[in-house]
Amino acid sequence: MECMKFENKLAAVFCAFCFIFIVWQLQTADCRSFSVDYEKDCFLKDGKPFQYVSGSIHYSRVPRFYWQDRLKKMYMTGLNSIQTYVPWNFHEPIQGIYNFKGDRDLEHFLDLANQTGLLVILRPGPYICAEWEMGGLPSWLLQKPNIVLRSTDPDYLQAVDNWLNVLLPKIRRWLYSNGGNIISVQVENEYGSYFACDYNYLRHLKVMFQYFLGESTVLFTTDGNTDWEMTCGTLQGLHATIDFGTDTNITEAFMRQRKFQPNGPLVNSEFYTGWLDHWGDVHAFVKSENITSMLMEMFALGVNVNMYMFEGGTNFGYWNGAEFNERYLPVVTSYDYDAPLSEAGDPTEKLFAIKSVISKFFSVPAGPMPPPTQKYAYGYVSLKKVSCITELLDDLCPQGPVHSYYPITFEEMKQSYGYMLYRTKLPKAFQSPTPLISPLNGIHDRGYVLINGLYQGVMERDTTLVLNVTGQEGDYLDILMENMGRINFGSNINERKGLVSNLYLGNYILTDWLIYALSFDEAVSSGLLQAEMRHYHSTVRRIENLKGPTVYKGTLEIQNVAWDTFLNLKRWTKGQVWINGINLGRYWSTKGPQQTLFVPGPILSTSVPNNITVLELEEASSTKQILFMNRPQLNNTVMRGEH
Ligand SMILES: *[C@@H]1O[C@H](CO)[C@@H](O)[C@H](O)[C@H]1NC(C)=O
Ligand SMILES: *[C@@H]1O[C@H](CO)[C@@H](O)[C@H](O)[C@H]1NC(C)=O
Ligand SMILES: *[C@@H]1O[C@H](CO)[C@@H](O)[C@H](O)[C@H]1NC(C)=O
Ligand SMILES: *[C@@H]1O[C@H](CO)[C@@H](O)[C@H](O)[C@H]1NC(C)=O
Ligand SMILES: *[C@@H]1O[C@H](CO)[C@@H](O)[C@H](O)[C@H]1NC(C)=O
Ligand SMILES: *[C@@H]1O[C@H](CO)[C@@H](O)[C@H](O)[C@H]1NC(C)=O
């Protein structure tokens, strides 16, 4: 209890000057401390042994107005802590420009957790994985061509230091010992699974964290449960923890932790309550019985457990990550994760099963679990075509295109996310079907091909690198390139987006590109894409055509209450949806397993019509209708992936 001695000394010094100050000290100095006891192999909170029961919730995946509701439900389940990541790219969208407002208000989230009575295990990265776009790293890091991410590369470290200089001072007052609720802070994330194995990088982060958060803050690492991961991921002075799910032998897992961390508390930093889906996967789920039996065993052993996820939430906008496992596999929009709280924050049967296990070992607060939020099936809404993409370039790219002899990437164009259009002209007439080829697999990640505005088909990374086209000399060849989310795990996290290598048409290398960086979100927010159908200024004969990248609009009018709802785009193909300017994420109805997008009630208006914008990339439903349902549909795989 060193802290008490220090406090006493402090009080004694002030005693001579100010009696009132001492009285205040005696009332408030309750000697808050959080530390590791390496003799008793446990955490100490205020000097007493402490075991945490925690659940992961990522504030970046839950709308701000629902933070309190989700936290309250976690508290009522009997958790004493939560764990969250801080996604760097969510807060520093442009180098040197920081955003901590609204849904990005980390301190408000910490405050709500504190008010709810929850301690916080903070995982500030800089890399987080998390199935989040580029593992939380800002894509602008890739503007430097040869940067080595997650290493002592000087450009990478400089950017990290600038970020930590902004983030960590905000965190300081939220440390438990400073009167806040943060009990421990993770350094990096599963660093042992990354190829670099650069101990100087981990040492550098440790120095930075200690400089800003003090020497006594509990710092830890988390790694997969293998020797090779623990070898590169752990560092002397950082408490080494492990993560594993229901397929693991608990005894063996903690033998591994002990091998690298001979003393101190046993910790499973990510006990998997479910799992994620990629497009084309069979929907993942993990049985409650498997969760509860393992929790029981771990609690009995005194293990500190964080359940990953407890509330998964949603990859709104462009925030989903991707895996690279022989081929590129983007993560779906929903991050429901089959977690105890559903994507929409509803307590599930799994939550109550977990609560009952917790109550056998810990005291669970009395009182009712907050009810699920209200859901409503608003039914069908008919959409109207606004225009196909090639007619909207002035609105989507007001600054005009960039000319480049060979194609350049999103990163070179300083376009982080979303879509860009690459335009060139056919060098000669191709009367018979001629292959458009990406010989170096350079379509990152999908390219929607048009000739003079007429849709030809899609090219796709790793799977469809050839597409036959025909056309006249001088015809426009347009390729709308979609960034489907950067890889969040492994050695490919430095991949670039867009057309990353040359395209051939027959034997011709295509050159002289005009590249349009498209700002869909800005155009939607400023109402540009809600205007009436455009007059075509192209000379090509138009027919009512459902194919090709096209913007559709519609309105949903609500009479009484704005409740949560789920948007189903059955018989549409693939695209992106905005409601009232909020980017709800991607749909891919012809693939699945996810079929509905979560629409949080609070974004809907009851007084004015709600504006819906759909960017359909391939082919619209012939009825042009979309359906608002009162329940999610996350388990309907239409087309299987090939992995
Ligand atoms: C956290 O909550 C406690 C208990 O309500 C309160 O005393 C403390 O001031 C709060 N901390 C911060 C940083 O707001
Ligand atoms: C879950 O538990 C069942 C028995 O209830 C068992 O057969 C199965 O292997 C377990 N699954 C996992 C992933 O541990
Ligand atoms: C787990 O591993 C230990 C040690 O290898 C072994 O004794 C035990 O039987 C295993 N438990 C299960 C459930 O397989
Ligand atoms: C492209 O067209 C040629 C005929 O010109 C045909 O042999 C080939 O199979 C076609 N390729 C594809 C991918 O459709
Ligand atoms: C939808 O757009 C109309 C016309 O631009 C606007 O008046 C209305 O306020 C918008 N609705 C919402 C909910 O923002
Ligand atoms: C998902 O759907 C399949 C096929 O309809 C069904 O067998 C399975 O039980 C469903 N899984 C869940 C978790 O609902």
Image (tube, helix red, strand yellow):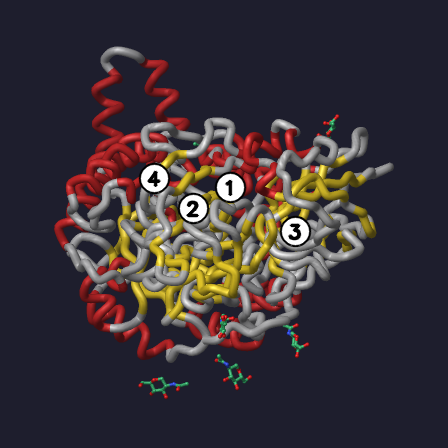
Q: Nearer the viewer, residue 541 or 22?
A: 541
Q: Are marks 3 and 1 in contact (CB under 8 Å)?
A: no
Q: Residues within 10 Å of mark 1 (few under 14, many from 20)?
A: many
Q: Is residue 70 above or below residue 263?
A: above
Q: Nearer the viewer, residue 40 or 282?
A: 282
Residue 508 location (% of width, % of height) = 35, 57
Residue 225 location (% of width, % of height) = 31, 71
Q: Could you tell me which secondary element the residue under label 2 belongs to? A: strand
Q: Residues within 10 Å of mark 4 (few under 14, many from 20)?
A: few
Q: Are marks 2 and 4 in contact (CB under 8 Å)?
A: no
Query: In the image, 361: left or right of 369?
Result: left
- In the image, what residue type sits under mark 2? Val
Q: Which residue is label 1 attached to?
A: 113
Q: Are marks 3 and 4 in contact (CB under 8 Å)?
A: no
Q: Could you tell me which secondary element the residue under label 4 belongs to? A: strand
Q: Which residue is label 3 attached to?
A: 598
- In the image, what residue type sits under mark 3? Phe
**Dividing the image into 4 quarters, which one contains the N terminus?**
top left
Q: Which residue is label 4 attached to?
A: 404
Q: Which residue is label 2 attached to?
A: 120
From mark 1 to mark 2, how far is it between C-alphas?
A: 8 Å
From mark 2 to mark 3, how far is it between C-alphas?
A: 27 Å
**Pointer 2 or 3: first along the chain:** 2
